Amino acid sequence: MPVLTFQNADGSLSEYAFSDAEPVLLRVRENGGARLGIGEGKPQAVITRAKVYQVPLVVNLSGDARVRVNGRRVVTLRVLRQGSRLQIGDLEMTFWEMTLQDVAAGSVLVGKRCPVCRLAYCAGDEVVVCPRCGVPHHKECWFEHEFCSNSGCLYPIRTTLKRLLAARSIVVEQLAANSQLVSQTMRCQAGTPGIDAQPFQAGQYVIYCPNRKCNAAFHLECWVSMGNCPACHKYDVSKLLRSVFTPNTPPYLGEEDAAAEEADA
Ligand SMILES: [Zn+2]
Ligand SMILES: [Zn+2]
Ligand SMILES: [Zn+2]
Ligand SMILES: [Zn+2]
Protein backbone atom coordinates (compact mmCIF):
# COMPACT_ATOMS: atom_id res chain seq x y z
CA MET A 1 0.00 0.00 0.00
CA PRO A 2 1.65 3.21 -1.08
CA VAL A 3 1.61 6.21 1.20
CA LEU A 4 2.74 9.70 0.26
CA THR A 5 3.99 11.78 3.16
CA PHE A 6 3.83 15.58 2.90
CA GLN A 7 5.67 18.01 5.08
CA ASN A 8 3.27 20.79 6.05
CA ALA A 9 4.26 24.43 6.49
CA ASP A 10 4.49 23.97 10.29
CA GLY A 11 6.78 20.94 9.89
CA SER A 12 4.14 18.34 10.77
CA LEU A 13 3.57 15.39 8.45
CA SER A 14 0.42 14.44 6.57
CA GLU A 15 -0.14 11.09 4.92
CA TYR A 16 -2.03 10.27 1.76
CA ALA A 17 -2.76 6.54 1.42
CA PHE A 18 -4.03 4.99 -1.77
CA SER A 19 -4.75 1.55 -3.16
CA ASP A 20 -3.06 0.02 -6.16
CA ALA A 21 -6.39 -0.55 -7.87
CA GLU A 22 -6.27 2.98 -9.32
CA PRO A 23 -3.18 4.89 -10.33
CA VAL A 24 -2.58 8.23 -8.61
CA LEU A 25 -2.72 11.24 -10.88
CA LEU A 26 -0.42 14.17 -10.19
CA ARG A 27 -1.16 17.61 -11.57
CA VAL A 28 0.85 20.82 -11.53
CA ARG A 29 -1.21 23.99 -11.24
CA GLU A 30 -0.52 27.11 -13.29
CA ASN A 31 0.73 28.95 -10.20
CA GLY A 32 3.31 26.21 -9.54
CA GLY A 33 1.27 24.42 -6.87
CA ALA A 34 0.27 20.83 -7.37
CA ARG A 35 -2.36 18.40 -6.28
CA LEU A 36 -3.20 14.72 -6.30
CA GLY A 37 -6.13 12.74 -7.54
CA ILE A 38 -8.97 13.00 -10.00
CA GLY A 39 -9.64 16.36 -11.63
CA GLU A 40 -10.05 18.19 -14.90
CA GLY A 41 -7.56 18.07 -17.72
CA LYS A 42 -4.64 15.83 -18.31
CA PRO A 43 -2.37 14.93 -15.37
CA GLN A 44 1.37 15.60 -15.68
CA ALA A 45 2.38 12.37 -14.01
CA VAL A 46 0.98 9.18 -12.61
CA ILE A 47 2.08 6.75 -9.91
CA THR A 48 1.35 3.19 -10.87
CA ARG A 49 2.74 -0.30 -10.54
CA ALA A 50 4.70 -2.27 -13.13
CA LYS A 51 2.83 -5.36 -14.34
CA VAL A 52 5.98 -7.39 -13.92
CA TYR A 53 7.19 -7.72 -10.29
CA GLN A 54 4.67 -5.06 -9.14
CA VAL A 55 7.37 -2.45 -8.64
CA PRO A 56 6.02 1.09 -7.99
CA LEU A 57 6.77 3.62 -10.74
CA VAL A 58 6.25 7.29 -11.43
CA VAL A 59 5.54 7.98 -15.09
CA ASN A 60 5.97 11.49 -16.51
CA LEU A 61 3.13 11.76 -19.02
CA SER A 62 3.64 15.35 -20.16
CA GLY A 63 7.42 15.55 -20.14
CA ASP A 64 7.03 18.43 -17.68
CA ALA A 65 10.45 19.32 -16.22
CA ARG A 66 8.80 19.97 -12.84
CA VAL A 67 8.38 16.22 -12.19
CA ARG A 68 11.40 15.07 -10.14
CA VAL A 69 12.59 12.16 -7.99
CA ASN A 70 15.35 12.84 -5.45
CA GLY A 71 15.94 16.18 -7.15
CA ARG A 72 16.46 14.78 -10.64
CA ARG A 73 14.12 15.21 -13.55
CA VAL A 74 12.02 12.19 -14.54
CA VAL A 75 12.30 12.00 -18.32
CA THR A 76 9.93 9.07 -18.92
CA LEU A 77 9.58 6.91 -15.83
CA ARG A 78 11.42 5.99 -12.67
CA VAL A 79 11.15 3.21 -10.08
CA LEU A 80 10.11 4.48 -6.66
CA ARG A 81 11.95 3.16 -3.62
CA GLN A 82 11.04 3.42 0.03
CA GLY A 83 11.78 7.00 0.99
CA SER A 84 12.05 8.34 -2.58
CA ARG A 85 11.49 12.11 -2.63
CA LEU A 86 8.95 12.98 -5.29
CA GLN A 87 8.58 16.57 -6.47
CA ILE A 88 5.88 17.89 -8.72
CA GLY A 89 5.80 21.64 -9.14
CA ASP A 90 6.51 22.98 -5.66
CA LEU A 91 4.81 20.06 -3.92
CA GLU A 92 7.29 17.72 -2.29
CA MET A 93 6.32 14.26 -1.06
CA THR A 94 8.07 11.18 0.24
CA PHE A 95 7.02 7.77 -0.99
CA TRP A 96 6.66 5.02 1.61
CA GLU A 97 4.97 1.67 1.41
CA MET A 98 3.80 -0.69 4.16
CA THR A 99 4.93 -4.15 3.10
CA LEU A 100 4.17 -7.61 4.42
CA GLN A 101 6.71 -10.37 3.93
CA ASP A 102 7.47 -13.91 5.04
CA VAL A 103 10.73 -14.46 6.88
CA ALA A 104 12.66 -16.88 4.63
CA ALA A 105 14.99 -19.53 6.08
CA GLY A 106 18.23 -17.69 5.33
CA SER A 107 16.84 -14.16 5.87
CA VAL A 108 18.87 -11.52 7.70
CA LEU A 109 15.83 -11.15 9.96
CA VAL A 110 16.21 -14.63 11.49
CA GLY A 111 17.46 -14.18 15.06
CA LYS A 112 16.70 -10.42 15.17
CA ARG A 113 14.12 -9.37 17.76
CA CYS A 114 10.71 -7.79 17.32
CA PRO A 115 10.64 -4.46 19.22
CA VAL A 116 7.13 -5.17 20.56
CA CYS A 117 7.22 -8.77 21.90
CA ARG A 118 11.03 -9.05 22.07
CA LEU A 119 10.92 -12.54 20.49
CA ALA A 120 13.40 -13.45 17.76
CA TYR A 121 12.03 -13.88 14.22
CA CYS A 122 11.80 -17.43 12.88
CA ALA A 123 11.48 -18.69 9.32
CA GLY A 124 7.81 -18.52 8.29
CA ASP A 125 6.89 -15.53 10.48
CA GLU A 126 5.00 -12.73 8.74
CA VAL A 127 6.68 -9.38 9.19
CA VAL A 128 5.67 -5.78 8.47
CA VAL A 129 8.53 -3.35 7.92
CA CYS A 130 7.65 0.15 9.12
CA PRO A 131 7.53 2.30 5.98
CA ARG A 132 8.88 5.33 7.82
CA CYS A 133 11.67 4.05 10.11
CA GLY A 134 12.36 0.67 8.47
CA VAL A 135 12.10 -1.35 11.70
CA PRO A 136 10.51 -4.80 11.17
CA HIS A 137 7.67 -6.03 13.42
CA HIS A 138 5.62 -9.25 13.59
CA LYS A 139 2.38 -8.67 11.69
CA GLU A 140 0.30 -9.17 14.86
CA CYS A 141 2.59 -6.92 16.93
CA TRP A 142 2.48 -4.17 14.29
CA PHE A 143 -1.31 -3.98 14.10
CA GLU A 144 -1.71 -4.17 17.88
CA HIS A 145 -0.67 -0.52 18.18
CA GLU A 146 -1.98 2.78 16.97
CA PHE A 147 1.48 4.11 16.06
CA CYS A 148 4.86 2.56 15.26
CA SER A 149 6.47 1.59 18.56
CA ASN A 150 9.93 2.74 17.53
CA SER A 151 10.64 5.88 19.54
CA GLY A 152 10.31 9.07 17.53
CA CYS A 153 8.77 7.36 14.49
CA LEU A 154 5.04 7.50 15.30
CA TYR A 155 4.02 6.14 11.92
CA PRO A 156 0.17 6.11 12.05
CA ILE A 157 -0.64 2.39 11.66
CA ARG A 158 -4.34 2.38 12.42
CA THR A 159 -5.41 5.43 10.44
CA THR A 160 -3.42 4.24 7.43
CA LEU A 161 -4.97 0.76 7.59
CA LYS A 162 -8.40 2.29 8.10
CA ARG A 163 -8.09 4.51 5.02
CA LEU A 164 -6.78 1.67 2.95
CA LEU A 165 -9.59 -0.72 3.91
CA ALA A 166 -12.13 2.07 3.33
CA ALA A 167 -10.86 2.26 -0.26
CA ARG A 168 -12.08 -1.36 -0.54
CA SER A 169 -15.40 -0.54 1.16
CA ILE A 170 -14.36 -2.33 4.37
CA VAL A 171 -15.36 -0.24 7.38
CA VAL A 172 -13.38 0.04 10.60
CA GLU A 173 -15.13 1.82 13.45
CA GLN A 174 -14.20 2.87 16.96
CA LEU A 175 -16.92 1.66 19.31
CA ALA A 176 -18.98 4.27 21.13
CA ALA A 177 -20.35 3.54 24.63
CA ASN A 178 -23.89 3.31 23.22
CA SER A 179 -23.06 1.08 20.26
CA GLN A 180 -25.01 -2.17 19.97
CA LEU A 181 -21.96 -4.39 20.36
CA VAL A 182 -21.14 -2.78 23.72
CA SER A 183 -24.68 -2.47 25.11
CA GLN A 184 -25.54 -6.08 24.17
CA THR A 185 -22.21 -7.33 25.61
CA MET A 186 -21.36 -9.07 22.32
CA ARG A 187 -18.02 -10.85 21.99
CA CYS A 188 -15.37 -11.05 19.34
CA GLN A 189 -15.34 -14.59 17.91
CA ALA A 190 -11.62 -14.66 17.18
CA GLY A 191 -10.90 -16.23 20.57
CA THR A 192 -7.67 -14.32 21.09
CA PRO A 193 -6.37 -14.97 24.62
CA GLY A 194 -6.59 -11.85 26.80
CA ILE A 195 -8.59 -9.36 24.76
CA ASP A 196 -11.43 -11.78 23.91
CA ALA A 197 -11.99 -12.87 27.53
CA GLN A 198 -14.26 -9.81 27.81
CA PRO A 199 -17.12 -8.47 25.64
CA PHE A 200 -16.52 -5.52 23.30
CA GLN A 201 -15.59 -2.29 25.10
CA ALA A 202 -16.12 1.34 24.11
CA GLY A 203 -13.04 2.79 22.42
CA GLN A 204 -12.01 -0.47 20.73
CA TYR A 205 -11.59 -0.64 16.95
CA VAL A 206 -13.94 -3.08 15.25
CA ILE A 207 -14.18 -4.46 11.73
CA TYR A 208 -17.05 -6.44 10.19
CA CYS A 209 -16.45 -9.52 8.03
CA PRO A 210 -16.74 -8.29 4.40
CA ASN A 211 -18.73 -11.44 3.52
CA ARG A 212 -22.20 -9.87 3.44
CA LYS A 213 -23.87 -13.07 4.66
CA CYS A 214 -21.57 -13.11 7.69
CA ASN A 215 -20.86 -9.55 8.80
CA ALA A 216 -19.47 -10.82 12.15
CA ALA A 217 -17.68 -8.17 14.26
CA PHE A 218 -14.04 -8.57 15.30
CA HIS A 219 -11.44 -6.44 17.02
CA LEU A 220 -9.21 -4.95 14.34
CA GLU A 221 -6.11 -6.49 15.94
CA CYS A 222 -7.76 -9.93 16.12
CA TRP A 223 -8.95 -9.70 12.52
CA VAL A 224 -5.54 -8.95 10.98
CA SER A 225 -4.04 -12.12 12.49
CA MET A 226 -6.84 -14.43 11.29
CA GLY A 227 -6.61 -16.84 8.34
CA ASN A 228 -10.22 -17.59 7.37
CA CYS A 229 -13.02 -15.79 9.18
CA PRO A 230 -13.91 -18.06 12.18
CA ALA A 231 -17.60 -17.12 11.88
CA CYS A 232 -18.34 -17.93 8.21
CA HIS A 233 -15.18 -19.97 7.44
CA LYS A 234 -15.33 -18.41 3.98
CA TYR A 235 -13.69 -14.99 3.97
CA ASP A 236 -9.90 -15.27 3.60
CA VAL A 237 -8.44 -12.41 5.66
CA SER A 238 -4.80 -13.32 5.17
CA LYS A 239 -5.31 -13.35 1.39
CA LEU A 240 -6.86 -9.88 1.52
CA LEU A 241 -3.95 -8.55 3.59
CA ARG A 242 -1.48 -10.06 1.14
CA SER A 243 -3.20 -8.33 -1.74
CA VAL A 244 -3.14 -5.04 0.18
CA PHE A 245 0.49 -5.15 1.30
CA THR A 246 2.64 -6.01 -1.71
CA PRO A 247 6.23 -6.93 -0.92
CA ASN A 248 8.15 -5.65 -3.94
CA THR A 249 9.10 -2.09 -3.08
CA PRO A 250 12.84 -1.56 -3.52
CA PRO A 251 14.52 -0.75 -0.17
CA TYR A 252 15.38 2.68 1.18
CA LEU A 253 18.91 3.71 0.23
CA GLY A 254 19.27 6.76 2.45
CA GLU A 255 19.53 10.28 1.02
CA GLU A 256 23.14 10.15 -0.13
CA ASP A 257 23.03 6.72 -1.73
CA ALA A 258 19.79 7.58 -3.49
CA ALA A 259 21.39 10.69 -4.99
CA ALA A 260 24.40 8.65 -6.15
CA GLU A 261 22.14 6.05 -7.74
CA GLU A 262 20.20 8.72 -9.61
CA ALA A 263 23.44 10.20 -10.91
CA ASP A 264 24.50 6.80 -12.26
CA ALA A 265 21.19 6.16 -13.96
ZN1 LIG B 1 6.47 -9.37 17.95
ZN1 LIG C 1 8.45 3.23 12.46
ZN1 LIG D 1 -11.00 -10.06 19.44
ZN1 LIG E 1 -17.13 -14.03 8.10
Image (cartoon, rainbow, N blue to C red):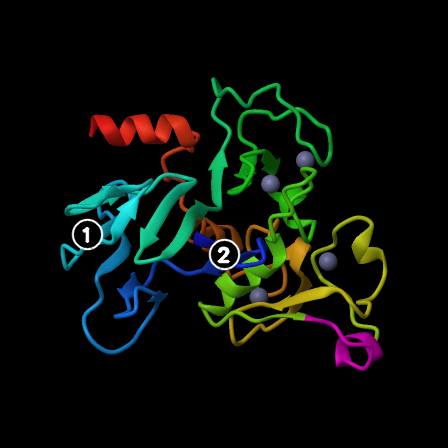
Q: Which residue is under mark 2?
A: 236
Residue 144 visible somewhere in the drawing:
yes
Marking on residue 65: 1
Task: Check residue 177 for magenta coloring.
Answer: yes
Task: Check residue 223 for magenta coloring.
Answer: no
Q: Residue at x 29, y 27 (%)?
A: 261
Image quadrant holding the C terminus, namely: top left
Element assignment for label 1: loop
Q: Nearer the viewer, residue 203 or 64?
A: 64
Q: Earlier in the sequence, mark 1 or mark 2?
A: 1
Q: Residue at x 84, y 56 (%)?
A: 197
The kind of residue on which mark 1 rests is Ala
Q: Is residue 264 above or below residue 58?
A: above
Q: Position of residue 239 (x, y in %)?
A: 46, 52
Q: Residue at x 45, y 53 (%)?
A: 3
Magenta stretch bounds? 174-184
Q: Position of residue 87 (x, y in %)?
A: 33, 51
The answer to whether residue 206 is left or right of residue 66 is right
The kind of residue on which mark 2 rests is Asp
